[in-house]
């Protein structure tokens, strides 16, 4: 188990003058959905070129006022993270690999010409918010408290250069179980649009990547599918990922494959964790390129038996059907696969403290 260093920065604490009533909070926590309800507090930390990180506050959740000329509104200099706090089997609270989120936040910051945030401040900011809003854990099975740290260019300036002021914030949202047991596998649409190009920002977790994925995602929905899958921008041949989840393929010989990180794929922490868990089980996992033609052929021949997407929000989502302008095929039975379910259960058990954490992934905060 990872331990936390001494509190690295002093947070000014402002209690909420009128937090949600027990009744209102209770209703939200019984049916939280995803991303639409927020807890009582939020974290704010400022950065300026002359003072560095300063003015750390944990105060009431609420709107922030920004000038119309604030740089982020014009040039999208913004990055974010997504992680969850889990209620443990023993009643405690834990974070899952928050250092990995801190590290990825900083690599995103470097790519977007933004200041890095010391890992201990990042983890402490998340910890403070969870402890302040510990009454905000969903009461539904499989629920968690989703945490969204983000940073944006807050300088009031329309010139095109890196901002001299940034605002870092963390908000928390109670989240239900995305993957109710027995959930059907999803259908995905192979897009002709590209998500990320070589040399671009595909490996950074920035809002701009998502803005570019909305038209393709809407197209997938319009055509009757649930999600979009992107191929590489150069050859339009190699499978990359979904709009916000990485991919795994499971073959009949029991081996797995996940597309290798080429710089245009977001390095998911769920992807990385599953890689470790699968290898630990003695499974062979290849990180390689995999083409859309091979995917089609392997699904049709039966060589490919399962396929799933993975990410923090939904954990693991089985993929049953794939369609595009020139392809249309079903994977396995078209339903959730066995190995997919086993790997998901294993990861969830570690996150919720019902299985031993032999990798130092779990940080208990309460
Ligand atoms: C966040 C994200 C993922 C998943 O990353 P996790 O760390 O597993 O949550 C995958 N793809 C994209 C584009 C993402 O933004």
Image (tube, helix red, strand yellow):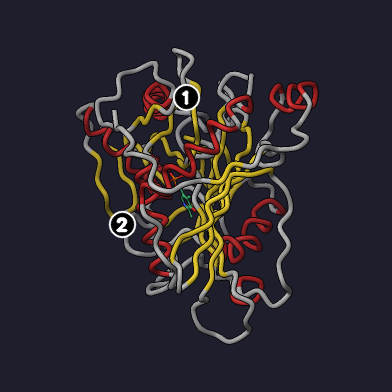
Q: Residue at label 1?
A: 93
Q: In this view, does 67 lie to the left or right of 340?
A: right
Which corner quadrant holds the N terminus? top left
The residue shown at (22%, 34%) is 279
Q: Is the CB atom of the residue marked by disc 1 within 8 angstroms of ligand 1's nearest atom?
A: no
Categorize mark 2 by other alpha carbons within 10 Å: few (<14), some (14-19), many (20+).
some
**Residue 239 visible at all:** no
- Indicate which disc residue 249 carries: none
Q: In this view, does 82 lie to the left or right of 271?
A: right
Quarter of the view holding residue 349: top left
Mark earlier in primary sequence (1, 2):
1
The residue shown at (73%, 62%) is 65
Instruction: Give the percent coordinates (x, y) of residue 208.
Output: 56, 66
Of 175 and 364, the residue lying toward us: 364
Q: Residue at label 2?
A: 289
Q: Is residue 60 left or right of residue 320?
A: right
Of 329 and 43, the residue lying toward us: 43
Quarter of the view holding residue 37: top right
The residue shown at (41%, 35%) is 306
Of 198 and 153, the residue lying toward us: 153
Instruction: Give the percent coordinates (x, y) of residue 340.
Output: 41, 30
**Residue 197 visible at all:** yes
State if disc 2 and disc 1 touch (CB < 8 Å).
no
Of 149 and 230, the residue lying toward us: 149
Which corner quadrant holds the C terminus? top left
Q: Which residue lies furthest to the top in this view?
A: 90
Q: How far apart are marks 1 and 2 (CA)?
A: 38 Å
Residue 62 against residue 142 in the figure, above or below: below
In this rendering, the count of numbered labels is: 2
Q: Is the CB atom of the residue marked by disc 2 within 8 angstroms of ligand 1's nearest atom?
A: no
Categorize mark 1 by other alpha carbons within 10 Å: few (<14), some (14-19), many (20+).
many
Residue 196 against residue 84 in the figure, above or below: below
């Amino acid at each position: 188990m990872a331990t936390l260093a001494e509190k690295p920065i002093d947070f000014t604490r402002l209690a909420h003058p009128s937090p949600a009533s027990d009744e209102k909070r209770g209703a939200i926590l019984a049916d939280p959905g995803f991303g639409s309800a927020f807890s009582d507090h939020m974290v704010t930390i400022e950065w300026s070129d002359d003072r560095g990180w300063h003015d750390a506050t944990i105060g009431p959740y609420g709107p922030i006022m920004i000038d119309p000329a604030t740089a982020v509104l014009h040039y999208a200099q913004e990055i974010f993270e997504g992680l969850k706090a889990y209620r443990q089997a023993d009643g405690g609270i834990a974070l899952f690999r928050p250092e990995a989120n801190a590290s990825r936040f900083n690599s995103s910051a470097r790519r977007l010409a933004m200041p890095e945030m010391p890992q201990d401040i990042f983890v402490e900011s998340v910890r403070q918010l969870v402890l302040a809003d510990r009454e905000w854990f969903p009461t539904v099975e499989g629920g968690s408290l989703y945490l969204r740290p983000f940073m944006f260019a807050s300088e009031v300036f329309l010139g095109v250069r890196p901002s001299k002021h940034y605002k870092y914030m963390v908000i928390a949202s109670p989240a239900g179980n995305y993957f109710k047991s027995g959930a059907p596998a999803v259908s995905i649409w192979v897009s002709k649009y590209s998500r990320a190009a070589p040399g671009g920002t595909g490996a950074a977790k920035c809002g701009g990547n998502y803005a570019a994925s909305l038209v393709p995602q809407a197209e997938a929905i319009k055509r009757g599918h649930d999600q979009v899958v992107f191929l590489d921008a150069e050859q339009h041949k190699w499978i990359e990922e979904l709009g916000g989840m990485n991919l795994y393929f499971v073959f009949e010989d029991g081996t797995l494959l996940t597309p290798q990180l080429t710089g245009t794929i977001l390095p998911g922490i769920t992807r990385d964790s599953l890689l470790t868990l699968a290898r630990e089980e003695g499974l062979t996992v290849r990180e390689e390129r995999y083409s859309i033609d091979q995917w089609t052929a392997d699904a049709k021949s039966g060589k490919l038996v399962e396929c799933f997407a993975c990410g923090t929000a939904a954990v693991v989502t089985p993929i049953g059907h794939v369609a595009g302008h020139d392809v249309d095929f079903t994977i396995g039975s078209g339903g959730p696969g066995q190995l997919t379910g086993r790997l998901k259960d294993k990861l969830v058990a570690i996150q919720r403290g019902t299985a031993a954490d032999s990798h130092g992934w779990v940080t208990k905060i309460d």
